[in-house]
């Protein structure tokens, strides 16, 4: 193979890769539109479990697909190599947190063409100074300890300093780590249904039975994926749901309750009530 043949072959394969990437992004959008990912925790998990992507690769494709949906002109830019998955995902992550018109999104995409990830980060910070990605880190440093790094705005800092003042008698000289730990434990003690005790007097109330259902499920989604037979176990937006709806004769007994995360609650509602009934409640991206 000559140098020219090598370069020609590479050029053809790179262009084919871009075309395939575009097709994959459109298929991801169609999977989301049809709700085919809902047996899994979310669209990213669907791509990880079903198609063996790493979580980072799956997330880049999901976010890039959503950017493609809202900015159709981005398709040609990706085909030509002016955009890539990383910068598209980086930009869509900001769009997820702010209200931006379709015209403004198109303008931002034009600005990011041909830019590196670092260059695009600066552009986003300048355009959305309050919403550009903040580099928060929360990672384990050894078997028992973790390091948390966050950026606090003025209001949050003032509130945290006031907490330190209020605890100065019971926790003199407490470190910020001790203050944050105290607040976290206090909130869990007061608000977490898994941490609240079940008293005999509560057992007859509907709220208490729901709390028992959460405790039984350890606060995790109980949905079982029919393809993998794996339990979801998500702890995000977990809701207590009737196995048999009360409108269809279901009771408020503990045995008729289960815990489902919001996506799987919607999926089960669609199965029972029908797709047309539940279509207005599907998340819109």
Image (tube, grey):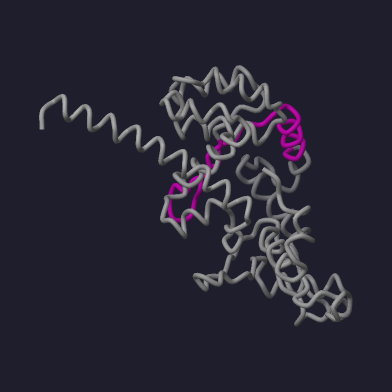
Q: Number of marks in the image?
A: 0
| Most foreground residue, 56 or 81 | 81
Q: Please provide percent x and percent y for residue 6.
A: 17, 30
- The residues colored magenta run 136-164
Q: Is residue 147 visible?
A: no
Q: Residue at x 49, y 27 (%)?
A: 76
Q: Is residue 40 magenta?
A: no
Among the 4 quarters of the image, the one containing residue 13: top left
| Residue 216 in the image: above or below residue 142 | below
Q: Is residue 264 visible?
A: yes
Q: Residue at x 58, y 58 (%)?
A: 36
Q: Residue at x 55, y 72 (%)?
A: 226
**Image quadrant occupied by the C terminus:** top right
Q: Please provide percent x and percent y for residue 53.
A: 42, 51
Q: Which residue is most to the left?
A: 1
Among the 4 quarters of the image, the one containing residue 70: top right
Q: Residue at x 76, y 44 (%)?
A: 169
Q: Is residue 155 magenta?
A: yes
Q: Please provide percent x and percent y for residue 96.
A: 65, 36
- In the figure, is residue 128 to the left or right of 112? right
**Image quadrant occupied by the N terminus:** top left
| Residue 69 in the image: above or below residue 256 | above
């Amino acid at each position: 193979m000559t140098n020219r043949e090598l370069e020609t072959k590479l050029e053809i394969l790179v262009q084919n890769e871009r075309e395939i990437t575009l097709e994959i992004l459109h298929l991801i959008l169609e999977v989301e539109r049809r709700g085919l990912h809902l047996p899994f925790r979310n669209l990213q998990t669907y791509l990880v479990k079903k198609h063996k992507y790493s979580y980072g690769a799956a997330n880049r494709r999901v976010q890039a697909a959503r950017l493609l949906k809202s900015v159709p002109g981005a398709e040609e830019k990706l085909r030509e190599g002016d955009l890539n998955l990383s910068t598209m995902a980086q930009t869509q992550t900001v769009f997820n947190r702010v209200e931006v018109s379709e015209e403004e999104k198109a303008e931002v995409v034009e600005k990011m063409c041909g830019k590196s990830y670092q260059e695009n980060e600066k552009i986003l910070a300048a355009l959305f100074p309050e919403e550009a990605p903040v580099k928060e880190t929360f990672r384990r440093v050894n078997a028992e300890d973790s390091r948390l790094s966050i950026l606090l705005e003025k209001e949050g800092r003032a509130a945290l300093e006031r907490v330190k003042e209020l605890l100065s008698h019971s926790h003199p000289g407490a470190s910020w780590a001790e203050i944050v730990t105290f607040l976290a434990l206090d909130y869990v003690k007061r608000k977490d249904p898994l941490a609240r005790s079940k008293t005999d007097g509560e057992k007859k109330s509907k709220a208490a039975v729901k709390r028992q259902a959460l405790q039984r499920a350890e606060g995790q989604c109980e949905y079982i994926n029919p393809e993998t037979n794996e339990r979801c176990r998500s702890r995000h937006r977990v809701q207590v749901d009737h196995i048999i709806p009360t409108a269809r004769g279901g009771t408020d007994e503990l045995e008729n309750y289960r815990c489902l995360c919001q996506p799987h609650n919607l999926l089960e509602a669609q199965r029972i009530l029908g797709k047309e009934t539940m279509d207005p409640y599907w998340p819109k991206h």
